[in-house]
Image (cartoon, rainbow, N blue to C red):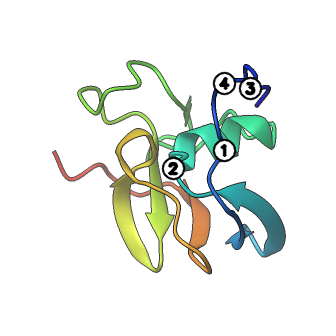
Amino acid sequence: MPLDGNIERGAAVTIDLNGKPVTAYLGESVATVLLSESVFAMRTTTSGESRGVFCGMGVCFDCLVVVDEKPNTRACMTWIKAGMKIRTQEGLKASN
């Protein structure tokens, strides 16, 4: 994401996004990285409907992904860590 000259970006780290190495930055949310990689459908419902970031503050549970093999993780509320493994979530039911 573009930054104003007065804002410092966190350190660059590599994560695994759906089996592909991607550069992300500490201090970013998983949702930010997914959107910057043009991943707008972060999960599908059990009926196959796409879901993604809606509220951006952890209330709607539409941005659920699998992080380090843990399903139903809110992408908008999870911060990037070096080496994390992120998968879009296919057909799993939200736990809320």
Look at the numbered discs 1 and 3 and tell me whether their residues touch, using CB distance below 8 Å. yes
| Residue located at (55% from left, 46% from top) | 28
Cα–Cα gap, marks 3 and 4: 8 Å
- Across the whole image, how many numbered discs are drawn on residues? 4
User: Which one is earlier in the sequence, the residue at label 2 or at label 4?
Assistant: 4
Residue at image position (79%, 61%) is 23
For residue 43, say whether it is visible: no
Using the numbered discs, state the Cα–Cα distance from disc 1 to disc 3 in whole angstroms.
8 Å
Q: Nearer the viewer, mark 4 or mark 1?
A: 4
Query: How would you rate the neighbour count of disc 4 (Cα within 10 Å): few for under 14, some for 14-19, many for 20 or more?
Result: few
Q: Which marked residue is nearer to the observer: mark 3 or mark 4?
A: 4
Pick the residue in front: 14 or 70: 14
Percent from the top left, x then y, of residue 92?
41, 58
What's the mark number on residue 9?
Answer: 1
Check disc 4 and report the residue beneath it. 6
59 over 73 or under it: above or below:
above
Q: Position of residue 24 (x, y in %)?
A: 71, 57
The amino acid on which the numbered mark 3 sits, given as a three-letter code, is Leu
Residue projecting furthest to the front: 6
Q: Amino acid at mark 1?
A: Arg
Give yes or no for contact between labels 2 and 1 (Cβ–Cβ under 8 Å): yes
Q: Is residue 85 above or below residue 10?
A: below
Q: Mark 2 or mark 4: which is in front?
A: 4
Residue lying at 52% horizontally and 60% vertically, measured from the top left? 80
**Label 2 secondary element:** loop
